[in-house]
Amino acid sequence: MAVDPLTYEKEATNTPLEVYEWDNVWWEQTNNTTAKRVLYIGDSISYCTRNVVTATANNEVLVDGFATSKALDNPYFLPTLKLFMEQQPGRDAVLFNNGLHGWHLDEETGYRIGYRKMLDFLVQNANAPIWVLLSTDDASDADRNKRVIRRNEIARELAAEYGLPVIDLYELATTGENLHISDGVHFTAEGYQKFADCIVATLKEYFKMK
């Protein structure tokens, strides 16, 4: 079983910061300038999926990572992301996921506003096609999971408004065998492989790769 090294805020909190705040950034194989390069922005799920995507693609697609616990209204989110993006010589695609942090944000105003602001930023700065990835579920908390579902609906609505394609990780996480670890939020190695297979298939189809 995979053990996720990062955190998920279990407490019902109304504070902008979680008990533990973290960022993890990763630039994959900096000397490789021939493979397709993808920036995956997300959370601990993206953190644990990123390297599996690269391996599954046999290094033909390299996935750089910007994983964080930052909420969408964190004033340092976009500046920190922008600094990381400026260090990259370029990217061929961007994957964006957000929905399992920032529980102080109500869905209809705070979350929607923050999500739109992020998409505006990515459209202006990515210089690459963008995919919206829906959040995986919270199998440990039915009420919290209802919020995840609503956040995914908002993500779909905004993706459609911006003309962006969607990868539905929620459906993958909740269909078939239960691949969660004991916390009900993170996944076994088989779960992350399931996500990676879908992402690689999507990217290879876009890049016209075999």
Image (tube, helix red, strand yellow):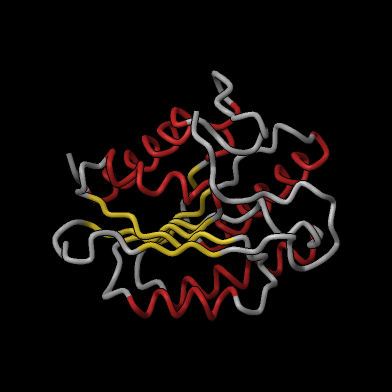
- Residue 170 versus residue 105 in the image, above or below: above
x 44%, y 37%: residue: 195
- Residue 209 versus residue 120 in the image, above or below: above
- Residue 82 versus residue 204 in the image, above or below: below
Residue extending farthest top: 177
- Circle count: 0
Q: Where is residue 156 shown, x and y percent of the image?
A: 60, 51
- Residue 146 is left or right of residue 83, and the answer is right
Q: Where is the C terminus found, in terms of image quarters? A: top left
Q: Where is residue 203 shown, x and y percent of the image?
A: 32, 47
Q: Name the one closer to the observer, 27 or 94.
A: 27
- Residue 130 is left or right of residue 54, and the answer is right
Q: Name the one closer to the observer, 51 or 164.
A: 51
Q: Where is residue 57 shown, x and y percent of the image?
A: 25, 42
x 83%, y 39%: residue: 143
Q: Name the one closer to the observer, 65 or 60.
A: 65
Quadrant of residue 84 within the rendered picture: bottom left
Q: Where is residue 163 shown, x and y percent of the image?
A: 49, 59
x 65%, y 64%: residue: 21
Quadrant of residue 85 within the rendered picture: bottom left
- Residue 73 versus residue 112 in the image, above or below: below
x 60%, y 28%: residue: 174
